[in-house]
Amino acid sequence: MSDIIQLLPDSVANQIAAGEVIQRPASVVKELTENAVDAKADSITINIKDAGRTLVQVIDNGTGMSDTDARLSFERHSTSKIRTADDLFAISTMGFRGEALASIAAIAHVELKTKQDNNETGTHIIIEGSKVVSQETTSCTKGTNFAVKNLFFNVPARRKFLKSNTTEFGHILSEFQRIVLAYPEIEFKLYHNDSEIYLLPKANIRQRIVAVFGKRINQNLITIESNTSIISVSGFIGKPEYARKKSGEQFFFINDRFMRSAYFNKAIINAYDQILQPETVPSYFLYFDANPSTIDVNIHPTKTEIKFEDQQAIWQILHSAVKQALGKNNIVPSIDFNQEQGFDIPVLSKDTDIRNPQIEIDPTFNPFEHKKPTNQNPKSSAISLEKENLVNWDKLYDGFEKENQQSNDFSFISIGNSQQTITDQSISDKYFHFKNKYILIPIKSGLMIIDQKRAHERILFEKFLQTLSSESAVTQKSLYPKTIELDTKDHALLMEINHDLKTLGFDIDDFGGNSIIINGMPVDSGNQEPEQIIDKFLNEYLTKEVDAKIQAKEKIAKSLAKATAISSNQHLNNEEMWEMVDLLFACQNPNYSPFGKLIVSIITTDELEKRFN
Ligand code: ADP
Ligand code: MG
C-alpha cells in the first residue's frame, strides 16, 4: 500500500479552530480508539493502568500504517482524512484534525507498533515529549498498537489537575461507552489494571446496549424510527417508569459519532411530558443520520457539540418520533373515554398536589351519570376528590395537536394513529370478570382488559410510597399479638427497616433472639395472615431487586405491594371491579405494574372485526 498521509495546507489548518485535545487520560482513550475505528478495525482492545496515568494502550486489527505514515502521523496537522477545506464539511470519519497524535506525543511516552496487511514487517517507533527516540522495523501482526505511558510527564500542572483514579476511570468509561454504542459491529475489550471490565462481542445495537448496561435494560427499550428528508432518527427510548434520577444512559449519535445536545435532550423530555416522575430522566439511545453537508462538527474542539442547518425542524421531528413511540407502546393509553362522563385517565402535572388514594368509596357515585358535579359530596367520594386534582389525560396530546398543525409544514412527519378523538361514548357500567383474573371493559375503541393482580400491585405500590413519605398510615392493632421466629438475616433486615414498616402501619417489635412480635398490621393489608405477608414480603425484598439505584423506600413499597396484592384467582364483584379500575386510573402510572409488567391492554374494534371477516 502506498503512503497516504499528507500535510494539511495552512489555509485548511487555520479553518480548524485550535483547541486542547488532550485534557485527561480519557481524551487519549477517545482519540486512539477513534483512530482504530477509522482504520476499519473490527476488534479493538484497550488496556488501562491506574486510570490511564501510567498506561493507555489501544490495539487494533485495522489497516495499519506504512513506515513513513507511522512517522508522519505524529506531525501536527498530519491526517489521511482530509485534503481540502471542502472535505471538512463532508467528513464522515471520527478524527480529521490531524492533531491528536501530535498532541499526545508532546506530553507522554508513546510507543507505536504498526503493520499493513501486505507488508512483511512492521514499524516500531518510540517518541518521548515529541522527540523520536527510535524507529526500527519489527515483526508484528496486522494493525496498530499504541501504548501511551506516563501521561503529562512533562506538564506537572496538568498532572496535578487530574482527579482521583475513580473519577478519571469514570471519564474513560463514558468515552468508551460513547464509542462502543456507535459501533456494535466492532468487538471491544476493555481491561483496567489487568482485570476485564468489558468484553463486547460483535452485536446489533440493542444487544450492544444490553451488553453495556446489563440485562435489566432490555425490557425497558422502546424502538424508535423516523425517516425524513432532513434527517433519519432510529434507536431506542426508555419506558417512563424506568426513568432514573441519575443521568448516564442518554446518548445521541450523529452519523455514528457521539454528540451532546441539551437542545435535543429537551425535545425528548418534553415529549414524555407529564408521564415522568419528577426529576427523573428517561434512557435514550438515538442515532441520527444526516447528510454531512448539513452539519457543522467543527464548533467544538472535542467535537461533541454539533450544529445542524435545520435545528428546529429536527427538534420537531425528534419530538414527534418520541411521542409516537410512546403512544404506540401504550405508555400513553389511547383510550377514548368521554371526559364529561367522568371517567378519565389521570396524568399528574409537575405542580399537582399528589394526594393519597383513599379506599373508602361512595357506592352511589356513578361516574357515567351525566352532569353530576364531582365535588358535590366531597366527604363520601374519595374518587371525586381525586378527580379534582387530575389533569385530563388527553392534555398529553395538546402538544401533539399543535404538532399536527405544524406538520403541514413538515409533510414528512407522519403522526400515525396515536391521537384519537374523544367523542360519544359507549361504556358499559357492568364489568365482566374473566377467569377471576381479568377485568373486561367495553370502551368505544374496543375492549379494554385489565390484569387485576398487577392493577392492585400498582395501586398499593403508589399508596405505600405516598404513605412512606407522608407518614400517615393507620395501624390495625391485633387482639392477639403474634410472635414469629425468623432466621438471623431476615430478622436483622426487618429490624433495619422497621421504621419504614411502622410508617406503613406495621407494629412490629423485637422479641429477643431472632423472633419478632407482630402487634398490628396496616388496616388495609387484606385478609392474609400477618406471618404470610411478612414471609412474602421478605421473600420479595431479599430475592428480587439488588439494584442499588432503587431507593430503599421504593423497594419496600414494591415488595409490600407484591406481598399484599390480591391473587390472580380471586373473585371480584362488580363493585370491587369498579373500585379497582377507578383506583388504578387514579394512579400516576396506570399502565405498568411496579415491576414493569403490562396492566392494561386493549383489543381494538378493528382487530375484533377482523376475526369475523
Ligand atoms: P486524525 O485522526 O485527525 O487524522 P490523528 O493525529 O489522530 O489525526 O492521526 C493521524 C493519522 O495517523 C490519521 O489520519 C491516520 O492516517 C493515522 N493513524 C492514526 N491511528 C491509526 C491507526 N490506529 N491505524 C491506522 N492509521 C492510524
Ligand atoms: Mg484521530
Image: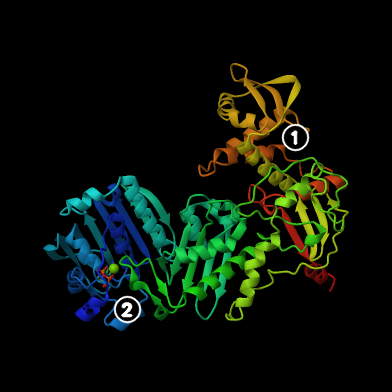
Q: Which residue is mark 1?
A: 524
Counting from the top left corner in percent of width and height, residue 182 is at 43, 65
Give, as a three-letter code, the residue at label 1: Asp
Name the one closer to the observer, 603 or 188.
603
Mark 1, Cα crowd under 10 Å, few <14 / some 14-19 / many 20+, is some
- Give the residue at x 18% y 72%: 72
Q: Earlier in the sequence, mark 1 or mark 2?
A: 2
Which of discs 1 and 2 lies nearer the camera? The answer is 1
Counting from the top left corner in percent of width and height, residue 572 is at 84, 44
Counting from the top left corner in percent of width and height, residue 97 is at 27, 72
In the rendered image, the vertical position of residue 228 relative to residue 201, given as above or below: below
- Quarter, ligand 1: bottom left
In the rendered image, the vertical position of residue 446 relative to residue 169, given as above or below: below
Q: Quadrant of the N terminus?
A: bottom left
Cβ of mark 1 under 8 A from ligand 2: no
Q: Quadrant of the C terminus?
A: bottom right
In the rendered image, the vertical position of residue 554 relative to residue 519, given as above or below: below
Tell me the SS state at disc 1: loop
Q: Which residue is mark 2?
A: 88
In the rendered image, the vertical position of residue 424 relative to residue 502, given as above or below: below
Mark 2, Cα crowd under 10 Å, few <14 / some 14-19 / many 20+, is many
Determine if residue 142 is in view: no
- Give the residue at x 56% y 68%: 319
Tell me the SS state at disc 2: helix
Determine if residue 98 is in view: yes
Name the one closer to the observer, 358 or 163.
358
Q: Label 1, label 2: how many angstroms apart (C-alpha)? A: 68 Å
Cβ of mark 2 under 8 A from ligand 1: no
Give, as a three-letter code, the residue at label 2: Leu
